[in-house]
Image (spheres, helix red, strand yellow):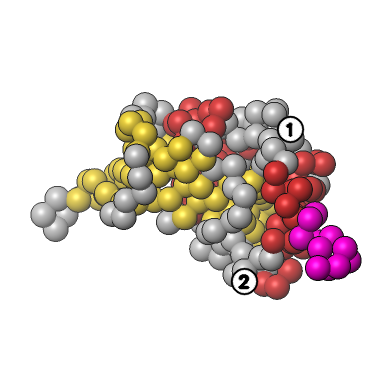
Amino acid sequence: MSSAASLPELQQRISEMQPLRIDERALPTAPGLGALLPGGALRAGSAYSVQGSWQLALAFLAEASQGGAWCGVLGCPEFGAEAAVSLGIALDRCVLIPEPGKHALTLAGTLSETLSVVVARFETRVSPADIERLAARLREHGAALVVVGEWARSESRLTVLSSRWAGLGAGHGALTARELTVQSEDRRGLRRHSVRFERGRLAVDRREAPPLRALRAV
């Protein structure tokens, strides 16, 4: 194999061996979400992935926006202002781009230069090279990215295994609470957590299950 042909492959291998946490600065993170993440908080310059719940992904914006940081939501046409306020998101410091289309990746990079936390969903598969370029911009500008869906080299992968609602009786009542069973996969291994939302807002007192020995389908 020629040196020219092997250079991109070598660059990718070097990048994969580098530590993900270039910037160890913690970003404001709600106490109820801390157990899901290594170090108990979002880290500047890092990317995370959430599968199975927009509500969980958006909850990562609340603490930062309440503390005065600017945040962004990319690719969520169902975004509701009332639900966002219930989560604790400060709408006056939240940039919303509901349908970025084919420009989603470019916009995510641009937003990462000025915003502290960006939640994004990409409609098409993102190449490893594009992921590396975006990761470099996150590290350079100290932003955190929360991707709804798969994302290679995530600091933590969060997968919603189940969802339970409370509040409805026998054909009457109103939904008042939702409890998610969330699996985290990161350098700590596999863990299972319980995350509860009450009237749309994240509850603080959460339980964490013991580490899982193997990935199990539910």
Q: Are marks 1 and 2 in contact (CB under 8 Å)?
A: no
Residue 23, disc: 1
The label shown at residue 73 is none
On screen, residue 35 versus residue 100, left or right, reads: left
- Residue shown at the point (27%, 49%) measured from the top left: 164
Spot the residue most to the front: 1
Compare marks 1 and 2 and give the one earlier in the sequence. Answer: 1
Nearer to the camera, 159 or 179: 159
x 64%, y 46%: residue: 47
Q: Name the residue carrying label 2.
A: 124
Q: Is residue 132 above or below residue 115?
A: below
Locate residue 168 relative to residue 187 in the image: left or right. Answer: left
**Which quadrant, please, contains the N terminus?**
bottom right
Question: Which of the two residues, 97 or 186, is positioned nearer the viewer here?
Answer: 186
The amino acid marked with disc number 1 is Asp
Q: Is residue 116 left or right of residue 79?
A: right
Q: What amino acid is at disc 2?
A: Thr
Q: Is residue 89 above or below residue 68?
A: below
- Magenta part mainly helix, strand or loop? helix
The image quarter in which residue 43 lies: top right
Asked if the magenta segment contains residue 200, the reply would be no
Q: Is residue 68 above or below residue 140?
A: above
The part of the chain drawn in magenta is 1-11
Report if residue 211 is visible in the image: yes
Q: Residues within 10 Å of mark 1 (few under 14, many from 20)?
A: some
